[in-house]
Image (cartoon, rainbow, N blue to C red):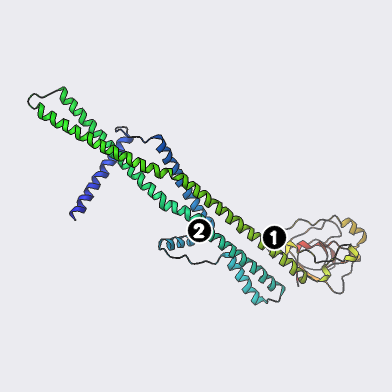
Amino acid sequence: MDFNVKKLASDAGVFFTRAVQYTEEKLGQAEKTELDAHLENLIARADCTKNWTEKIFRQTEVLLQPNPSARIEEFFYEKLDRKIPSRTTNAELLGQYMQDAAKDFGPGTPYGSTLITVGEFQRRLGAAEREFLQTSAINFLTPLRNFLEGDWKTISKERRLLENRRLDLDVCKARLKKAKLAEAKAAAAPDFQETRPRNYVLSASASAAEHELRVAQTEFDRQAEVTRLLLEGISSTHVNHLRCLHEFAEAEVAYYAQCHKHMQDLQKELSRANGDTFPDAFAVNASTSGMSPGPAPLPTATLPGVSSPSHPPNGSNALESNTLKIEEVKPPATGTRKAKVLYDYDAADTSELSLLADELITVYTVPGMDPDWLIGERGNQKGKVPVTYLELLS
């Protein structure tokens, strides 16, 4: 107990002495040993590396895991040295909800089967995202964290020790300077009664101060060399982080390439399913139009979240107006369908029908029509309407 009290008192005295030193240095009342320019440059470069590495590390964490609660949970798992549980990504969860909804709606219905297809691809996207997160955490985040929590802590410890050695060196310099001044003063104004004893004491005091200064200088030089070697290792840290950055970029490229491929496959699946969903009455008549038969392209307006499309190309309207008389068009016996209007549409001429969003109209096609247009009827009104403004109902 006595030892602890003495050590505490000693540490408090050292802290107070160094606080006084810092204050006097700031006020210009005490000399300060300056580090050489090369070491100062290494320290500035190390501080810059630490600051930007920390910012990049924090922002990468936010990119990979936007949920702050999840990041806090992962932090505690790491500190407790426990394995972080695997999380279901948002895309996987959405895919699961879609597939569960399809079971209730009926997997044999057009909506249910499409939900199953889109849900499966959402789960694939989620799996690709989870793989990307795991790869990035191992190849990029972990090396940055190891530098901040390992190498940088060692460098900071040695730098604090170097600063303490510098303060000790400055104290020894000040002590020697004071002893020299006292010795010179005594030599200039000797006391004939006690000259020899006092001069002997002052000389011994100056010799002891010189010895302490040599020891402090040696310790300072040794610590400066240790710190310099650690700081020069920052260059190898940059090389390591460069390699990790390349791996992170390659993982990101692979992830987005997977997502692009999944979306292309989904588009093909929906296009293939679209041929079974829409009846032949909406396909182009090859014998009259001169085009090869095939399913009409999937209108983008039927997908939720798509903004109002631009007007479809109307270059064939002039030709159609000469051969197609709207007032003479009769609905076919079979092949008419109901359609919901997605957006307002203003007719460009008398052959077209103006539309209001959310209203229901009857639509059908006739031989020779542009595949981007249908004939729409609302009560006694009739005219051409663009397919991209409609959601065809079964």
> Would residue 279 be visible to someone looking at this image?
yes
Residue found 56% across the figure and 51% down from its top = 246
Tag 2: amino acid: Ile
Quickly name the residue at label 1: 306
Residue found 54% across the figure and 67% down from its top = 88
Residue found 63% across the figure and 66% down from its top = 122
Figure check: 339 above or below 352: below
- The quadrant where residue 255 appears: bottom right
Is label 2 in a helix, a strand or a loop? helix
Figure check: 327 above or below 194: below
Report the disc number at residue 82: none
Most distant residue in the left direction: 193
**Which quadrant, please, contains the C terminus?**
bottom right
**Coordinates of residue 133 in the picture (x, y in percent):** 54, 60
Give 392 or 108, whichever is nearer the viewer. Answer: 108
Most distant residue in the top direction: 188
Q: Mark 2 vs mark 1: give the one in front.
A: 2
Is label 1 in a helix, a strand or a loop? loop
- The quadrant where residue 200 appears: top left
75 horizontally vs 383: left or right: left
21 horizontally vs 389: left or right: left
Give 149 or 112, whichever is nearer the viewer. Answer: 149
Give 235 or 120, whichever is nearer the viewer. Answer: 235
Query: Is the C-beta separation of discs 2 and 1 under 8 Å?
Result: no
Quickly name the residue at label 2: 138
**Which quadrant, please, contains the N terminus?**
bottom left
**Coordinates of residue 306 in the picture (x, y in percent):** 69, 60
288 horizontally vs 214: left or right: right
